Amino acid sequence: MKRAVITGIIFAAVLSVFLIMANYSGAIFELPERTYSIEVHENGYADITETVTYKMKKPFRYVTYAIDLPAPMKIRNFKIDILQGPPVLGGISYDKKTENSISTKILFSRSMEDYIPVTDNQIIKVAFKYTVENILIEGSDFTQLFIKYVGRGTVVRTKVLNVQVSFPLNFGEPLIYHHPWGLQFKSKEIASNLYKFEFRNIPKDCFVEGRFVFPGLSQTGTDYFMKNLTLKDVKDLEALYSRRVFLYVSGSITYVLLVLLIPIFIYRKLGRENPVAYDAEYERELPYKDLPELVNSVVKTICSLPGDDAIAAAVLDSVKKGDIQFVEDGNHQITGLRILNPNSNRKTLFDAFRIFETDGVIDFKNVKKGLKNQRKAQDFLKKINQWRTEIKKNVDERKYLDSKGNVIAKTFAIIFGVIIPLLSIVFLNRYYEPGFEIVNSYVSLLMILTSGIGLVIIAMRKDVFSRWSSEGLIYYLRWKNFEKFLRDFSLLSTYPPQSLAIWDDYIIYATTLGIAREVIDNLKKLYPEPPATPVARTAYINPVIIHEISSFRTIAASTVSSSSRGSGGSHGSGIGGGAGGSRVGAG
């Protein structure tokens, strides 16, 4: 469970960084406010004023504005008014200026090599005014204004967008639709033929468009016709868009809940043990006489392959039994080991170490050096893993743990909690449709959350979704209570072992349980002088030797792993089809 909590914390940190980076642009400006005001006339023309407020954050030279309109719309009488800001020393230039497109640059420095220093709260406010011919679109039984207030291509978010739209009184009351879904939006005022809206926190590179549909209206004077498009078509398009948005969002929320609830169901059905008749607070003696590596496999790795601590514990136990002898230098430091009984019940483990044997001695310096060699590392790892598999086979024969629930839960988490959500994120970001930008952001965020849930489930201990047998649960609990006894110095000092020789067993099994350092420290508090027993004496003088032996498999695996890596919509109808939509920038 601790590992799952750590995984959850790491995921939350990564998600926070992701969200921060998603909103970070690195641009030299911000857009605290934009306004879009359009007055539509009966002849199909419209007068538009866009006011853009740039807040400069770094030294700058210019600001930009661009807009493109589809034919037969035409831009007339384009004007720029500088409402606030420094003098326009470099003038106003146009990269493009046609009937349908405008791309302009307002240069505040004298040249492109000069920069204007930024003062506190440096604001540039510019009004772009123009008239658009044929802005209305006539269908077979309706007329619509389908226009973007802002377009894609702006690299920073717009904090506030105020929109004002007015129509001739004789147009009647329109059906109003806005895209994309998910914008922070409210109708500020609707009076007669005047409509006001406010949008907040528009993401970067996101358009905002409005569709105003007047049923039965025709002969407005526009030259923009789509006679094959009916009012029913428009309503059907908007209804389909709403349904798809609902399905995307509700489906994603449902998916998250299923990924969360199904593992809970698996746990309730396959992971809860039946109560057992065992209520001891701790164990003072070794609960069982099993080999320490077998205890490690059952208790520490939850009936899986024994971990690296099991290697050190097995070596210490072999020293105690006389199958292995530590080799010391003149300062009583452990430098290696000598195998005295190569045909013991740990022959496979001993064979792994004998790869590095020279003149009957296995020097630890030679071991670590040899483990950097690809061939020797592979041979060592093969033998060690063979030994670990033998231990795991003995554990499986005891049938202490039914891991069916764990297999189902982890497989479910990998497929539905990680793979599918990540593929969905890639798909959404590569193949998105206009109008679904914010929906995709919500769905992607939910899929990231789902991946976090999946990773937490994968990181959970094996026994969370597995079920111990009654015998297996008692075995596990007794060893955990023995671990609690070894860790608690007050208990150790109250009930010290009757013989110092028992400390060898304490240290061996503390090593297999992963608490050797704590137990050695407790031993030193009780007995300042090192005992004469081989294991306890070694632990007193050379406590780091336990960690050193435990690290050999990891070093070999790293060598083998590093070697392996070295080898190998249309305008006027569909969502997002609104005309125009300016994009702004600065440099």
Image (spheres, helix red, strand yellow):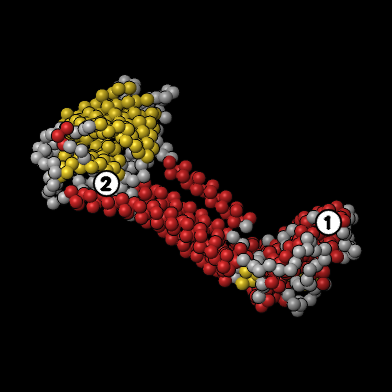
Secondary structure type for disc 1? helix
Q: Nearer the viewer, residue 504 or 466?
A: 466
Percent position of residue 426, x then y: 39, 55
Q: Quick check: marks 2 and 1 in contact, CB under 8 Å?
A: no
Percent position of residue 567, x then y: 49, 64
Q: Is residue 474 left or right of residue 82?
A: right
Q: Is residue 522 left or right of residue 438?
A: right
Look at label 1 and name its amino acid.
Answer: Leu
Residue at the image point whose x is 73% and y is 62% from the top? 480
- The numbered mark, 2 or 1, whose residue comes first in the sequence reads 1
Instruction: Name, please, the residue furthest toward the top.
Output: 87
Q: Which mark is residue 576?
A: 2
Residue at the image point whose x is 16% and y is 36% from the top? 171
Write down the quadrant of residue 267 in the picture: bottom right
Q: Is residue 524 left or right of residue 133?
A: right
Residue pointed to by mark 1:
491
